[in-house]
Amino acid sequence: MLKVRIIPTLLWKDLGLVKGIAFDSWRRVGTVLPAVKVYNMREVDELIVLDITASREHREPDYEAVAEFSGDCFVPLTIGGGIREMDHIKKLLRSGADKIAINSAAYDDPELITRAAMHFGSQCVVASIDARKSDDGAHYCYSLCGSKPMGREVVAWAMELERLGAGEILITSVENDGTMNGYDLDLLRKVSENVGIPVIASGGAGNYQHMADAVSIGKSSAVAAASMFHFTEQTPLSAKQFLQENGIPVRNANMRQ
Amino acid sequence: MATALIIDYGMGNLHSVRRAFEECGAEVLISDDPKDIRKATHIVLPGVGAFHDGMTSLVQSGWCEAVRRESEKEGIPVLGICLGMQLLAEKGHEGRETEGLGLVPGTVEKLIPVSSMTRIPHVGWNEIYRTRENPLFEGIPDGTDFYFVHSYRFVPERQEDAIAMTPYCGEFASAVMHHNVFGVQFHPEKSQKYGFQVIKNFLALN
């Protein structure tokens, strides 16, 4: 049976590892490389590393840094931030990324998703959406690290990204992010029920129950978390044990560390 | 010492494959020149992406002929990984019908969801169960999870060429073996301890 993945997310800004609340008040929480090494040693299911300011600052991805992260990382690695062209994707894959995440550029150039999927395969194209809930209960998309409203409703955009060729959707609730109060389950369920590709839940995880809810209620294929692993004693391994006890299939729940 | 030649035909992440083979004790040569194939004790065909693009690039760069010759005439062990496994087939049906390397009899077809909850691509960790004893899975317990990321599956013509199966969309061949040619649908370079065991087992072949 396919296992539910637990994915630590590393947000990276000016070479430092950071974590914010609702995409603001960024706190420096270390450096990226040692964090990648620790997660590699712990044999986590996957890692997502996002350069959160690259697009806003019109920077290309930092290929050298990515090569450094991936050098000793034998964990499937998704890299995002600043990707706008096919050439950026090619260089990232060559630097050791297994998958790439595209967010802001998909709004300006939706065909980029299609070109990438046609050439590199949709399995390596993760479409990332940052969403906020509006007063009418609908969720809308934001780009450039949650700063720019795109006027698009989330479910319609997720379906469009699937049609364009995305292989997975990484869906982040901007207002829940960093609060550790739980994922936006309504957002997750709406997206998961309307696409046929895997959905990775992101934004708000604070404890293991939140992860179980993202799977059982939110119908997500994978759960991503950052603050919960940076700021509390909770670990991906214990999360797996909890999920397994709750009947959710995971791998390596019984490994020793 | 084994010299693993990793074929560089412009499809995907060679970096992790190289690092994994180095960790497993091989001397690694990444090459885009088919002439280098003579230096290899083991040939690795990695790759992610589309069957048609992959095959076009293998043909144009001259690898196609070189790999067929070395594996068939010289008996050099070949390992195809993910797209690389699929390219070993005779035919691919991704987008349009494309002729493959034809080193393992079979075709490549899209995974068909069996329920509304089945997601395609098949991404993540899933079990493998061997169908018979084989050198590639020596020391690997049945039910071990490997890392997959793909939308297509290899359908071997001869059942005995499928050496491991994985339950998804019914079940599919997650590894094939035909004489000295091996293919794995999962990514051994990203499957940690047991992935490395697969690589070591491959490097032990000669």
Image (cartoon, helix red, strand yellow):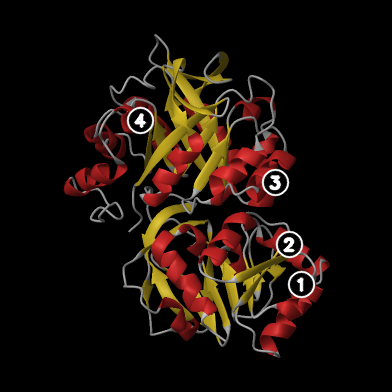
In three-dimensional space, the C-alpha distance between marks 4 and 2, rounded to whole angstroms, equals: 40 Å
| Residue A167 visible in this rendered orientation of the protein | no
Looking at the rendered structure, the kind of residue marked 4 is His
Tag in front: 4 or 2: 4
| Residue A141 visible in this rendered orientation of the protein | yes
Q: Counting residues from the N terminus, which is met first, the one under dot 1 or under dot 2?
A: 2
Left or right: A209 in relation to A251: left
Residue at the disc numbered 3: A90
Q: Are marks 1 and 4 in contact (CB under 8 Å)?
A: no
Q: Counting residues from the N terminus, which is met first, the one under dot 3 or under dot 4?
A: 3
Please determine if labels 2 and 3 lie on a single subunit.
Answer: no
The residue that appears at 36% across and 77% down in the rendered structure is B139
Residue at the disc numbered 1: B63
Looking at the rendered structure, the kind of residue marked 2 is Tyr
Looking at the rendered structure, the kind of residue marked 1 is Trp
Residue at the disc numbered 2: B9
Q: Are marks 1 and 2 in contact (CB under 8 Å)?
A: yes
Q: Looking at the picture, does residue B52 appear above or below residue A136?
A: below
In three-dimensional space, the C-alpha distance between marks 3 and 4, rounded to whole angstroms, equals: 31 Å
Provide the secondary structure element on which disc 1 rests.
helix
Which image quadrant for residue A182?
Answer: top left
Which image quadrant for residue B194?
Answer: bottom left
Can you name the residue that lies furthest to the top here? A135
Residue at the disc numbered 4: A230
In three-dimensional space, the C-alpha distance between marks 1 and 3, rounded to whole angstroms, equals: 21 Å
Residue B93, x across and y down, in percent: 63, 64
Residue A80, x across and y down, in percent: 57, 35
Chain under numbered label 4: A
Other residues around mark 2 within 10 Å, as few (<14) / some (14–19) / many (≥20) = many
